Amino acid sequence: MLRKTLLVFVLGVLMTPVLFAQVYLTRNGTIRFFSEASLENIEATNRQVSSALNIENGEFVFRLPMRSFAFEKALMQEHFNDNFVESHKYPNASFEGEIHGFREADLLSGEEVEVMVEGELTIKDVTKGITERGTLRMEDGDILGSAVFVIKPEEYNIRIPTRYVRNIASEIEVFVDVRLSDKL
Amino acid sequence: MKTWKIVLLTVVALGIIAALLVYFLVYNKPHPDYATMDPDMELPAEQLYRDFVNDEQRAHERYNGKVLQVQGQLAEVEQVDDMVILSFVFEEGMFGGEGVRCTMLESYKEEALSLAAGTHVTVKGFCTGFTGSDVILEHSSIP
């Protein structure tokens, strides 16, 4: 599974028949999630997101180590890794898909472009199709990409024990922010 | 004071103390102090990278979630927003130089920024995994 994901991640970009300069990359994208529940709000941020966007055909991928999510509370971080996402068994999450609704010329104008992000999100051992809105904007030669996904933990085989149902929301907002560059 | 009152007050006091202990020592326990922790393993940075490239699953089982102390020739000192990253590079790939990337703790940023590429350095950090191109060490320090 891990090998397959890695292979798809690398080959999906490398085998694309376009010039290398048309692929924009980052190793330090940010994914943040926010859970709002009756007892508490939980937020965590991951700044080790590797991502690539082919601006000719819109192919977009990202991959992140789950254990890089940083929480305010150490106990929450432990529960997240050990009990919920089982980082020891499923160390990465990934997305492979496309961004629709933009042209390179639109980006070069510097204006923010609204786009649709469509593809497959893999968390733990579950891969599900998602379609969400996002934005792209060019700044100083880099592409700034943002998107918000809403995911349900239960759909990704993340089981929340009954005693935590008032601590963790049934729907979690996931914010993706990347600054992609053609020169790393 | 009557005996039952003393017993009641004692029980209430013990209950409050227990609740405070749970709150501060469990619910609000601090994050590990990675800079002072003994490493679980010491190894060359290149071996760490090669182990992930050759057998990612096995490398995760061995290194992910562990404090590792790695040695090697520093390839790059990078600043990304407020992060300072020391890189050991062993291959050229899609992302440029690929290898081991160590995100430094706040208190070690200045020292990390003063290091020159080519220097032989030892870095200790918490291994969070492999991005497909790089092994990630976070909360890193220079022992």
Image (tube, grey):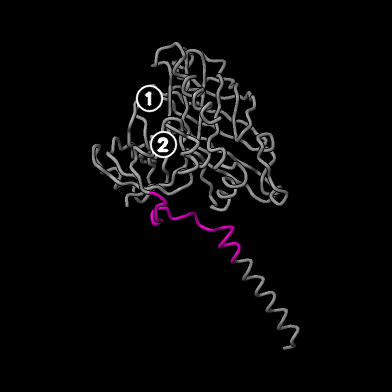
Disc 1 residue crowd, few under 14, some 14–19, many 20+, Cα 10 Å: few
User: Residue A41: x, y in percent?
Assistant: 62, 47
Closest to the observer, A183 or B35: B35
Q: Residue at x 69, y 79 (%)?
A: B9
**Secondary structure state at the residue bearing disc 2:** helix
Q: Find out whether the residues at labels 2 and 1 contact each other: C-beta distance under 8 Å.
A: no
- Which circle, 2 or 1, is nearer the viewer? 2
Which label was assigned to residue A1?
none
Closest to the observer, A148 or B119: B119
Name the residue carrying label 1: B93
Give the amino acid at mark 1. Answer: Gly
Judge whether residue B39 is colored magenta: yes
Question: In the rendered structure, which disc, 2 or 1, sits on the residue that comes first in sequence?
Answer: 2
User: Residue A127: x, y in percent?
Assistant: 62, 28
Instruction: Kindly identify which chain the residue marked by label 2 belongs to.
Output: B
Vertical placement of residue B15 versus B89, above or below:
below
On the rendered image, what quadrant is the N terminus of chain B found in? bottom right
Q: Which residues are magenta?
A: B21-41
Name the outermost residue toward the bottom: B1
Instruction: Kindly identify which chain the residue marked by label 1 belongs to.
Output: B
Vertical placement of residue B13 versus B94, above or below:
below
Give the amino acid at mark 2. Answer: Asp
Q: Quadrant of residue B102?
A: top left
Separation of disc 2 and disc 1 at Cα?
A: 17 Å
Name the residue carrying label 2: B51
Q: Is residue B65 left or right of residue A155?
A: left
Closest to the observer, B107 or B48: B48
* Predominant secondary structure, magenta span: loop
